[in-house]
Amino acid sequence: MKNYRTKIISNQEISPGYFRMKILAPDFGEKAHPGQFIMFRVQRSLPPLLRRPFGIFQTGSLPADCDGLPPKEFVEIVYKVVGSGTSIMAELHEGDRVELLGPLGNGFDYTSCEGEKILVGGGIGLVPLYMLAGELIAKGCSVRLLMGGRTRDDILAVTEFERLGVETYISTDDGSLGEGGLVTQVLERKLQEYPDAEVFTCGPMPMLSVVHDICTDYKVPLQVSLEESMACGVGACLGCVVKGAGHTEENPSYLCSCKVGPVFKSQYLDWAALGQNDDSCGGCA
Ligand SMILES: Cc1cc2nc3c(=O)[nH]c(=O)nc-3n(C[C@H](O)[C@H](O)[C@H](O)COP(=O)(O)OP(=O)(O)OC[C@H]3O[C@@H](n4cnc5c(N)ncnc54)[C@H](O)[C@@H]3O)c2cc1C
Ligand code: FES
């Protein structure tokens, strides 16, 4: 993990309210693992003081300039404008100075290529799945991506996933792109087709909860990337704790989402408690 005082290479709106930002980050790519995240801060402004967490979409390097300077290594994030921090980010341009801390958290576990790999991304939840898909394809795994969104505007980076060699399935709640209905219905069909699959998911909590229920019913392993609100991102503030499976008041189990996660094997989480605010944390595991 390193703190980069750096600058923006590009920041483009790719769908209404969604942006892709490339940030100069030498040596970042060799340390980053799919599913990890960064904490991002705009240097020039005071408010908002807190850093904001964003998943790593990809890392790479731009070709060397004609002037003989080395290639520019970058990390890329994809974000949705939802509040004060992301509104400020949307106004940034090439060359603006920013600060990022990362890579943070644990990331996905994908040692084996056995069985079909099914990735389920809801809206902006597809971000950490892109780097994962690339690594799985490079290992020779068969990868299917189920993308869900409210409308066509929420379906992002389809071409990029397809270029990797991923089989993609799109569903939107309003039927404006792909199949009409919920991405979880598509998941259920795919698990009937591929009962030996392994599932990886990221997205809004109600979707994650249904994905967990389906994978439990079909007895397939599931890894889930949580997007709990985070203040520090490094295990210091306890602002991101979630309850672990089997948590009781007598035997409390609290997991720091930013340190132990954000990716968890779904059976280790207390699904009944997820998404509910709780101030009773006694400390991170
Ligand atoms: C590990 C991790 C990875 C993430 N990756 C991405 C990503 O790749 N792309 C992306 O767009 N966003 C991602 N997020 C969410 C992102 O951090 C928030 O959207 C961002 O911090 C909002 O900042 P803001 O100042 O614009 O909004 P605020 O003004 O802080 O909040 C605006 C609204 O958004 C809600 N909100 C804030 N944070 C979250 C959250 N984590 N989950 C759900 N609702 C939230 C608030 O409750 C409020 O209603 C990630 C979060 C985590 C923890
Ligand atoms: S965000 Fe501070 S402990 Fe996790």
Image (cartoon, rainbow, N blue to C red):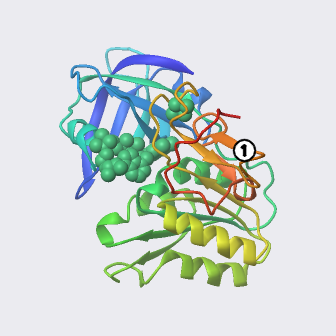
Looking at the image, residue 59 sits to the left or right of residue 249; the answer is left
Residue 179, x across and y down, in percent: 43, 84
Quick one: quadrant of the C terminus?
Answer: top right
Residue 212, x across and y down, in percent: 65, 67
Q: Residue at x 24, y 23 (%)?
A: 95
Crowding at dot 1, Cα within 10 Å, few <14 / some 14-19 / many 20+, comes out as many
User: What number of labels is visible?
Assistant: 1
Q: Residue at x 38, y 65 (%)?
A: 155
Extreme residue toward the left, this view: 91
Q: Residue at x 30, y 30 (%)?
A: 9
Q: Nearer the viewer, residue 206 or 79?
A: 206
Q: Label 1's element? A: loop
Mark 1, residue position: 253
Residue 45's place in the image compared with 126, above or below, is above
Residue 91, x across and y down, in percent: 17, 37
Q: Amino acid at mark 1?
A: Ser
Q: Residue at x 58, y 28 (%)?
A: 235
- State whether residue 62 appears in this view: no
Quick one: quadrant of the N terminus?
Answer: top right
Q: Quadrant of residue 124?
A: bottom left
